[in-house]
Image (cartoon, rainbow, N blue to C red):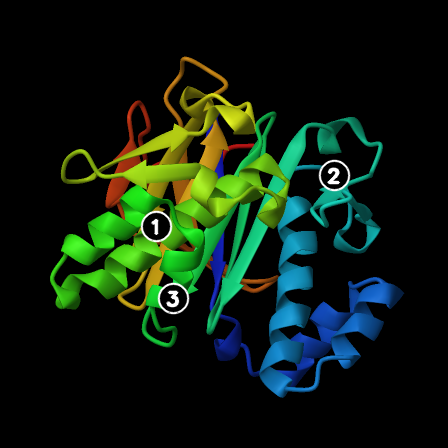
Amino acid sequence: MHAIDLWLVRYQEIIDPDLLTSLRQILSNEERCREQRFHFPDDRKRFLVTRATVRTVLSRYAPLAPAEWTFAATPYGRPFITNPHPHAQGLYFNLSHTKGLVVLGVCRERQLGVDVENIRTRKASPGIAERFFASSECADLARLPKSLRHERFFEYWTFKESYIKARGQGLSIPLDRFHFSFPQQGRVQLTVDAALKDDANRWQFWQFRPAAEYLLAVCAEHRSSEPTTIFLRSLIPTIREEHVQAMPRVISHGAAGQIETPLST
């Protein structure tokens, strides 16, 4: 499948205790123990809904029950599927969450990274940009009117996070050794330092605004000459799903996105 499916869950809206109990039952024993280690109720609910979302959604792509999925992690902490079932092979997923929203990206045969930020509850930090961003990105932020810097900061941040997550190496990749630019309205371009031994043309990027408070970036390997279709769906695990009408606000060269066709697996 050349599609990328993005599943969006507003976990704070799930308040039915019976539903939460049923979601907990499909988690592994280790996941249930991890849930209880969170101190704050919001963090516990987010963890529970996140893990249940992964399990229930993945079962749409392979004939495995949600409780049957097994996972391991790379040395960098990235989870991956270990089930030997042929339909589970080549299935990639990536997670991101922020205050109020969990996002799960799923695709086949291509590395994938997603990052979502609640730009209303989080503050842009000039100190973080100066410390971690590339010099060209810092210069761009400095040139902008103050009223525009907050959103541009998170445009950079979500794109950078999606890229390092797609690479699967997390913050071991220095954030100032690659940079993004916006050559024209609605377009983004990646440039990678030679020391990272990567080809910027290997990757495609999309950025969405699924709701006014959220900024969502997607990075995926460019593995086919066929255009990639992005599907966004709002989900309450095991209960219902709905299309999210949100065309990409920024894309890289050769990328595309639409939300018009039913889910294909």
Position in image of residue 84 (x %, y %): 84, 32
* 1 vs 3, front mark: 3
Label 2: which residue?
Answer: 63
Q: Residue at x 75, y 75 (%)?
A: 35
In this picture, residue 209 sits left or right of residue 12: left
Label 3: which residue?
Answer: 127
Q: Is residue 157 visible?
A: yes
Q: Which mark is residue 52?
A: none
Secondary structure type for disc 1? helix
Between residues 115 and 264, which one lies in front from this camera angle? 115
Q: Residue at x 32, y 74 (%)?
A: 120
| Circle nearer the N terminus (1, 3) | 3
Locate the C terminus by quadrant: top right
The amino acid sitting under disc 1 is Tyr
Label 1: which residue?
Answer: 156
The amino acid sitting under disc 2 is Pro
Find out whether the residues at labels 1 and 3 contact each other: C-beta distance under 8 Å. no
Q: Is residue 106 visible?
A: no
| Circle nearer the N terminus (2, 3) | 2
> Badge 1: how crowded within 10 Å, few (<14), some, or many (20+)?
many
> Badge 3: how crowded within 10 Å, few (<14), some, or many (20+)?
few
Distance Cα–Cα, label 2 vs label 3: 48 Å
Position in image of residue 151 (x %, y %): 25, 61
> Badge 2: how crowded within 10 Å, few (<14), some, or many (20+)?
few
* 2 vs 1, front mark: 1
Distance Cα–Cα, label 1 vs label 3: 14 Å
